[in-house]
Image (cartoon, rainbow, N blue to C red):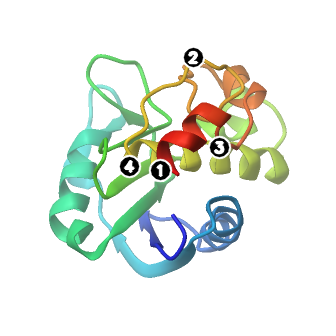
């Protein structure tokens, strides 16, 4: 990953501050250069009114077509994401491809009726960003529940895992 460049982009309305913080965390964790793009993507085409959510695969397809040729891209959104076979997803990525997306929607304490905690949000966002970026590096889900590549379908599982790759996953992307 050394020498590689990662671009972060907003999907829908989102303040730049969380992306700036995430870019700094990802640069340290993954040892790559991170830039935050000024541009945003309108996600309205991916909205599913019956679900009140946004189809993450449709968003990924557009990101890949419009930005994938420029290298690795992580999109961040406030929108609640889904894929048809699941109730929700925290994010999605192209396995071995250039693009990934993560949602802050269900990473916020407020979603669970708790007071806002910026530190918790930033930790969860980093973990989910590293997880989805791991998929872009070709990693699949890991059986080690502490590894960032462990599959998770509940926020308590996100909180339990680390933000780093286990030794086996590190070896696969080295």
In three-dimensional space, the C-alpha distance between marks 2 and 1, rounded to whole angstroms, equals 18 Å
Mark closer to the chain start, 3 or 1: 3
Q: Specify the label residue 121 is tagged with.
A: none
- Mark 2 or mark 1, which has the lower sequence index? 1
Element assignment for label 3:
helix
Of all residues, the one furthest to the left in this rendering is 65
Q: Say which residue appears at 56% left-offset and 36% top-offset.
A: 169
Dot 3 and dot 2 residues touching (CB under 8 Å): no
Residue at 74% from the left image edge and 36% from the top image edge: 162
Q: Which residue is mark 3?
A: 127
- Relative vertical location of residue 114 with respect to residue 6 in this rendering, above or below: above
Residue 104 in view here = no
Q: Position of residue 163 (x, y in %)?
A: 70, 43
- Counting residues from the start of the chain, the first of labels 4 and 3 encountered is 3
Q: Between marks 3 and 2, how big is the CA–CA gap?
A: 16 Å
Q: Provide the residue designation for mark 2.
A: 143
User: Tags 4 and 3 in contact by the CB under 8 Å rule?
Assistant: no
Residue 76 vertical placement versus 157 (above, below): below
Mark identifier at residue 133:
1
Q: Which secondary structure, mark 4?
A: helix
Marks 4 and 1, how far apart at CA = 5 Å
Marks 4 and 1 close (CB-CB < 8 Å): yes
Q: Can you say whether 35 is above or below 41 in the image?
A: below
The Cα atoms of the two marked residues, 4 and 2, are separated by: 18 Å
Disc 2 crowd rating (10 Å Cα; few below 14, some 14-19, many 20+) is few
> Mark 4 highlights which residue?
136
Q: Is residue 3 above or below residue 147?
A: below
State the CA–CA distance, disc 4 to disc 3: 14 Å
Q: Earlier in the sequence, mark 3 or mark 2?
A: 3
Q: Nearer the viewer, mark 2 or mark 1?
A: 2
Q: Is residue 125 visible?
A: yes
Which one is nearer the viewer's eye here, 122 or 132? Answer: 132
């Amino acid at each position: 990953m050394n020498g590689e460049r990662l671009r972060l982009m907003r999907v829908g309305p989102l303040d730049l501050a969380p992306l700036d913080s995430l870019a700094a965390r990802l640069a340290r964790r993954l040892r790559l250069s991170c830039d935050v793009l000024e541009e945003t993507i309108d996600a309205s085409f991916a909205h599913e009114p019956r679900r009140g959510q946004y189809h993450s695969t449709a968003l990924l397809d557009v990101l890949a077509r419009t930005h994938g040729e420029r290298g690795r891209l992580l999109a961040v959104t406030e929108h609640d994401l889904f894929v048809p076979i699941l109730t929700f997803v925290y994010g999605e990525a192209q396995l071995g491809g250039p693009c990934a997306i993560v949602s802050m929607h269900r990473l916020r304490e407020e979603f669970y009726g708790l007071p806002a905690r910026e530190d918790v949000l930033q930790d969860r966002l980093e973990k989910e960003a590293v997880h989805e970026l791991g998929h872009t590096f070709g990693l699949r889900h890991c059986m080690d529940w502490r590894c960032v590549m462990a599959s998770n379908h509940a926020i308590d599982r996100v909180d339990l895992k680390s933000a780093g790759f286990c030794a086996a996953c590190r070896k696969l992307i080295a």
